[in-house]
Amino acid sequence: MIALSNLSVVFGRGTPLEKTALAGLDLTIEAGSFVTVIGSNGAGKSTLLGVLAGDVIPSSGRVTIGGRDVTRVATAERAKLVARVFQDPLAGSCGALTIEENLALAAARGARRGLGLALSGRRRETFRERVAGLRLGLENRMEDRMDLLSGGQRQALSLVMATLAGSEVLLLDEHTAALDPGMAEFIMGLTQSLVDRHRLTTLMVTHSMRQALDHGTRTVMLHEGKVILDVAGEGRRSLGVEDLIAMFRKARGQALDDDALLVS
Ligand SMILES: Nc1ncnc2c1ncn2[C@@H]1O[C@H](COP(=O)(O)OP(=O)(O)OP(=O)(O)O)[C@@H](O)[C@H]1O
């Protein structure tokens, strides 16, 4: 289970650029659940993922994952617990290394004494099998440099890499936003099957209301660093994109302008 209590993040405190990104946010997420996270630009979505990954240290509040207080545990130290896939397909892997070297690094993530790039025949075969499961033909290109691949291929491999170190938590930060619609659909299908197979506790940030309702079992909406909407179960299943927009308007108490939130 993930528990975030009274979480605040203030950037640039005491400067003219001071910004409260999270403002006393409370959120509890059951182990194994898949939560979609929506909200307008600047609502605090990426900051929330950053806090879970350890990139952002909260100004106050507490973060526990699986009962362990990780509030001040550094990113590298919690890498075994949490994996993250970014919007930019180039962000999750190293272009100058081969596919299998990238996989080896991902598998060693968070290990005290990583196996690093040492690739035994058996590990090679395991990686090849995982990559073959994507059905993109990349298992025949294991020694190709990562920067020869398309954005979609890299994102598919980033997802596989996110599952190699045995993390319990998967953070997806608009991970299909930079892809064409066909590839985005493929990546979402892959995401769902990996989440199911590895029983990952998943948070997916998206600007697509459609995607937010079609995937996962719960949707939370952030606004000004707080959860302003939290829907699950039957109530969520009967919701459409229009309903979500109406709920957003009601919760926010003002008209929804031509915000990126409307992208569906
Ligand atoms: N490192 C930082 N330094 C200063 N301000 C920051 C930093 N990171 C985020 N912010 C600010 O905190 C607020 C929340 O940002 P965040 O990226 O979490 O929003 P978001 O909901 O992910 O937005 P978007 O949908 O545009 O990606 C924004 O006002 C942003 O400008």
Image: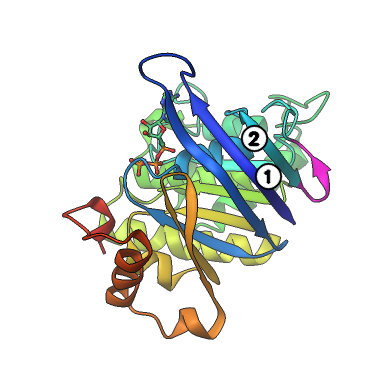
Direction left: furthest residue? 258
Q: Nearer the viewer, residue 6 or 213?
A: 6
Q: Looking at the picture, how far across and down is residue 222, in whole percent?
A: 44, 53
Q: Give the label on residue 164, or none.
A: 1
Say whether disc 1 or disc 2 marks the residue closer to the N-terminus. Answer: 2
Check disc 2 and report the residue beneath it: 106
Would you say the residues marked 1 and 2 are in contact, meaning their CB atoms lie under 8 Å apart? yes
Query: In the rendered image, which quarter is residue 115 located in?
Result: top right
Q: Residue at x 64, y 44 (%)?
A: 6
Q: In the rendered view, does 70 fall on the left or right side of 203?
A: right
Q: Residue at x 68, y 24 (%)?
A: 117
Q: Residue at x 51, y 57 (%)?
A: 134
Can residue 135 be spotted in the picture? Answer: no
Q: Nearer the viewer, residue 20 or 245?
A: 20
Write down the region rendered in magenta. 65-70
Disc 1 crowd, CA 10 A, few/some/many (<14, 14-19, 20+): some
Q: How many marks can you see?
A: 2
Q: In the rendered view, does 58 fall on the left or right side of 210?
A: right
Query: What's the residue type where badge 2 is placed?
Result: Ala
Query: In the rendered image, which quarter is residue 232 located in?
Result: bottom right
Q: Looking at the picture, how far across and down is residue 45, in whole percent?
A: 45, 45
Q: Establish if 258 lies above or below 84.
A: below
Query: What's the residue type where badge 1 is placed?
Result: Leu
Q: Establish if 220 lies above or below 20.
A: below
Q: Looking at the picture, how far across and down is residue 89, in whole percent?
A: 40, 38
Q: Quadrant of ligand 1?
A: top left
Where disc 1 sits, the SS reads loop
Q: Looking at the picture, how far across and down is residue 228, in whole percent?
A: 46, 59
